[in-house]
Amino acid sequence: MTRTRKLLIAVLAVGLAGLIPALAAQTVVGVTATEIKIGNTNPYSGPASAYGTIGKVIGAYFKKVNDEGGINGRKINYITYDDGYSPPKTVEMVRKLVEQDQVAFVFQTLGTPTNSAIHKYVNQEKVPHLFVATGATKWNDPKNFPWTMGFQPNYQTEGRVYAAHVLKNHPDAKVGILYQNDDYGKDYLKGFEDGLGEAAKKMIVLKQSHEVTDPTIDSQIVNLKNSGATVFFNITIPKFAVQAIKKSHDIGWKPVHYLNNVSSSLATVLKPAGLEASRGLITALYMKEVTDPQWKNDKGFQDWVAFMKKYYPEGALDDQANGYGYNVAILVAHTLRQCGNDLSRENIIRQAANLKNVELPLLLPGIKVNTSPTDHAPIEQEQLARFDGERWVTFGELFDAFRKQ
Amino acid sequence: MEIFTQQVVSGLATGGIYASVALALVMIYQATDVVNFAQGEMAMFATYICWSMLNAGLPYWGAFLATLGFAFIGGVVIERVVIRPVENAPILSIVIVTLGLLVICNSVAGWIWTYVQKPFPSPFPSKPFKVSLGAGETIFGAHDIGQIGITLFVLLCIYLFFRFTPLGLAMRAAAQNPVSSRLCGIRVGWMLALGWGLAAVVGAVAGMMVAPSLTLEPNLMGGVQIYAFAAATLGGFTSPGGAVLGGFIVGVVENLVGTYVSFIGTELKFTVALAMIIVVLLVKPSGLFGSTVVKRV
């Protein structure tokens, strides 16, 4: 045997040995020596286009990562499509990402109805479906949907936080609830009712729903006041939260008012509703509110501002969504670094489910990202905060969904 | 009893919002014989212009009047540029064009001013009135009353304009019978453009009155417009007074049905508005106060 022949056989043998386990468990798609392809859909048009900025800020962050040399020498190729917040469009776009663009994984697809539409598909195709931009509880179901992972604290967790606080501080309260009549509203409602447990039947005196298409919710507030409720759980998106705060103030109804985190923004909710009317509101937070002056000298906040000015100057600095996108983009970059050189789909989801005490710059101090193969809910801690007329003041301990309160 | 009166008052306040937008819809229908689906979005756009001027430091009423000017010019320009080329096309084409305008106005507003909600000031005091009616006291929002007052004032202006001014009469004639009007020496094309301008003005007033209650965002008019259609259909597209009354009726009925009819509740309130449109169209297509339109074919 000549030397070349020997070499050839040796190479072939090594190659085969390497190939066999790869065939058994590893699927590497969308990754080359110089590139990682990541797919995303966002509502850049249509009714939810206010959130479209999240998709853009993520792109801006990846540009920063690439400018700094990429991840393990690989540049991120971020492909993001407009789905207009329309589920059939999301299906079309995600199929395109997976089948034509051949992305390594799908990341931060935005919206509850839109993600519901692709939930089964990505799990059948075994494509990691990471850190989706919705607070629904169903993304944390690794037994049935092992390829899907949530991000922010889910609505049921948050509902339980309020319920625990009500039980502890207002055990004899009469509770009135206003909720948006869809999955989002009902998810919160379920967490809250589950949290109250046996006491729910006795305590809840009136539940009022509204449709997202309703121009006003004045009538519901009038009914809630009339029910004699002393605690008000307000499950509404910003537009209606403003009205609810204003109207209850105007008609002289002064319950203990719990406002869902979805509408906790100073700039878009509390200011339009009136700071005086907002005084005393209680919400649960997990992020630093970007318009809150208390973070002015915070390192994480300053880094974010510097990043925004350099990479996304057209983005609004008073829009919490831009802080949100920044946080989640950092988390995915962290996950990819943790993958090392094995960027198979299997390893990507394995590492995403193996995040331990990861800190993100715009999370409240003390809140950390933790996941495991049986826990696909990255952020599960929240802290209650009360509005003092100027800003949210956090109080009490961090509430952890897994710890018994 | 307290809950009943408070629901009626709250219904009147919401009805005032529907009425003001319905008035703009009726205005353009009277002046040009077109149902403009973009009316609400044009009003939203004008409201943003007012917001920008207020932000630049103009006093409220100064910005208010300047916005009316801009709205008028904007309405005329839209008619000249977008509507005029399809003037003689089938009605469906014009409807589609107005739907296109709706989407364009919405997206452009989002592009310029972003989708972040903005507070919009009210010219009226913020302190609500409390009035004792029967058993308990009923609370009226000062802005709600002011808004209803302004809507009624605009209604009066429209009535006087169409009834007693030569220009108003010429516009009505141009809308209803363009051929004969032209033979009488009315410049039909410009009458239609004026109609668009005036309807945009009425819409701008509505937008600036609605925004303090709903907060300003590009989707300000999305839900409102459907209720405004219900109001205009109920009152009659040919009757400004009817449309305003229709707005109040829709607002109050919606609240009372939501409160007292348990199987409808708050879940089906919106359906009530849509059901009203269908019932009116089936039973009395011209609306409660509208006149039946007779056309020679």
Image (cartoon, rainbow, N blue to C red):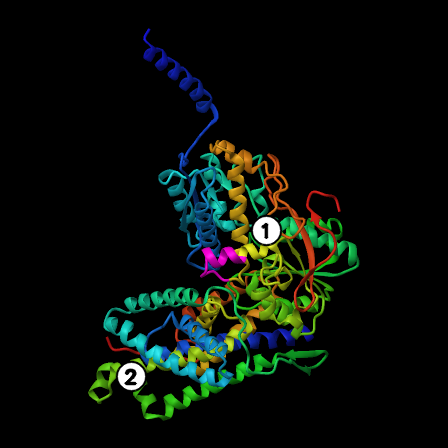
Above or below, B154 against A215 in this view is below
Of residues B36 and A104, the one nearer the viewer is: A104
Identify which residue is drawn at 64% across, 45% down. A368
Q: Position of residue B177 (x, y in %)?
A: 26, 82
Above or below, B96 against B154 in this view is above
Q: Residues within 10 Å of mark 2 (few under 14, many from 20)?
A: many
Q: Quick check: can you spot residue A145?
A: no
Q: Residue furthest top?
A: A1
Q: Which mark is residue B191?
A: 2
Residue type, mark 1 in image: Pro
Mark 2 falls within which chain? B
Q: Position of residue A399 (x, y in %)?
A: 70, 49
Identify which residue is drawn at 44% across, 49% down. A63
Q: Residues within 10 Å of mark 1 (few under 14, many from 20)?
A: some
Q: Which residue is mark 1?
A: A361
Of residues A233 and B255, the one nearer the viewer is: A233
Identify which residue is drawn at 51% across, 43% down. A333
Mark 1 falls within which chain? A
Is A401 placed left or right of B168 in the picture?
Answer: right
Q: Quadrant of residue A277?
A: bottom right
Position of the N terminus of chain A, as image quadrant, is: top left
Which residues, given as a range, are shown in magenta?
A305-316
Q: How many marks?
A: 2
Of residues A256 and B236, the one nearer the viewer is: A256
